[in-house]
């Protein structure tokens, strides 16, 4: 399918257009947070005890928190933190899962057995519970929360990438590449990877929101982003 046809089909779907507009709005909000937030200094943690716990008003549309900070400003700045976490978690998990899944699916044999048994061990635990355990071991902070969530999520992408690699590796163009004596790693990069990555991208786009929610849960429990840095948790 040509690029023009893909764009035309995409814009025919009203839900897709609405979804893209919402995502674009969030990204723009995160990028231009210093200019959009009415009280950027309060968003960064500066207290204003004279106006603590104020109700919503024209001056503070979302009210203020217990430290007198404007909640709207912190929500706008929190978009930046939460989107960074969401995209980082999914990106790391996809890279790890894709690498291991391609090896397991294409090479098979002992590689497949070892990788998939390790994957099954990780899948035996609920992702949030596993992330909570890892984060409590690594310590508090945004970076540790990202690593904890990525470690708990990569097995799902590994299984998906493995299934795609198995379905692709016996196709004629792959067999032809093998017959020409092309190295396995080149076949995986040139033939298996391009034909296996589409489902992972689709899954990743849906998982960004879940990653943000789980990161918010870790922050709520004191293991994620630490005060006064704002985030949606």
Image: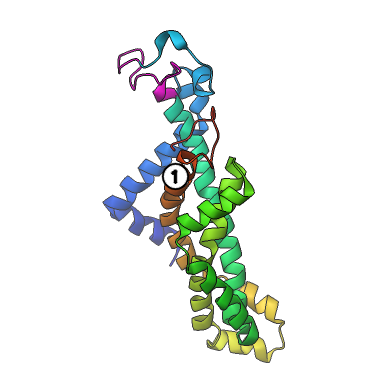
Label 1: how many Cα within 10 Å (few below 14, some 14–19, many 20+): some
Q: Residue at x 49, y 82 (%)?
A: 167
Main SS of the magenta part reads: loop
Q: Going by the image, does 171 lie left or right of 66?
A: right
How many numbered marks appear?
A: 1
| SS assignment at label 1 | helix
**Front residue of this view, candidates 108 and 123:** 123
Q: Is residue 86 above or below residue 122?
A: above
Q: How is the image coloured?
A: rainbow
Q: Residue at x 43, y 36 (%)?
A: 232
Q: Going by the image, does 129 lie left or right of 113?
A: left
Q: Residue at x 38, y 46 (%)?
A: 20
Residue found at the far left of this picture: 14
- Is 55 magenta? The answer is yes
Asked whether residue 192 appears in the rendered view, the answer is: no
Q: Position of residue 153 (x, y in %)?
A: 51, 60
Res 29 quadrant in image: top left
- Is 79 magenta? The answer is no
Asked whether residue 227 appears in the rendered view, the answer is: yes
Q: Residue at x 63, y 49 (%)?
A: 138
Pointer 1 residue? 217
Figure quadrant of the N terminus: bottom left
Q: Which residues are magenta?
A: 54-73
Figure quadrant of the C terminus: top left
Q: Position of residue 134 (x, y in %)?
A: 57, 54
**Front residue of this view, candidates 170 and 69:** 69
């Amino acid at each position: 399918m040509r690029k023009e046809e893909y764009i035309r089909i995409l814009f025919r779907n009203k839900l897709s257009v609405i979804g893209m507009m919402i995502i674009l709005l969030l990204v723009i909000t995160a990028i231009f947070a210093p200019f959009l937030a009415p009280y950027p200094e309060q968003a960064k943690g500066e207290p204003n005890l004279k106006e603590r716990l104020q109700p919503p008003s024209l001056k503070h549309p979302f009210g203020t928190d217990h430290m007198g900070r404007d909640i709207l400003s912190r929500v706008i700045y929190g978009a930046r933190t939460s989107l960074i976490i969401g995209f980082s978690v999914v990106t790391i998990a996809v890279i790890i899962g894709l690498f291991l899944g391609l090896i397991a699916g294409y090479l098979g044999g002992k590689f497949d057995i070892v990788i998939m048994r390790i994957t099954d061990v990780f899948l035996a635990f609920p992702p949030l519970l596993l992330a909570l355990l890892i984060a409590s071991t690594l310590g508090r902070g945004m970076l540790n929360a990202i690593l904890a969530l990525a470690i708990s999520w990569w097995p799902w992408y590994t299984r998906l990438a493995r299934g795609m690699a198995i379905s692709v590796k016996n196709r004629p163009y792959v067999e032809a590449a093998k017959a020409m004596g092309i190295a396995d790693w080149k076949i995986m990069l040139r033939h298996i990877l391009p034909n296996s990555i589409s489902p992972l991208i689709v899954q990743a786009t849906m998982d960004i929101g879940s990653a943000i929610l789980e990161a918010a849960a870790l922050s709520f429990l004191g293991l994620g982003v630490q005060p006064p840095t704002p985030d949606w948790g």
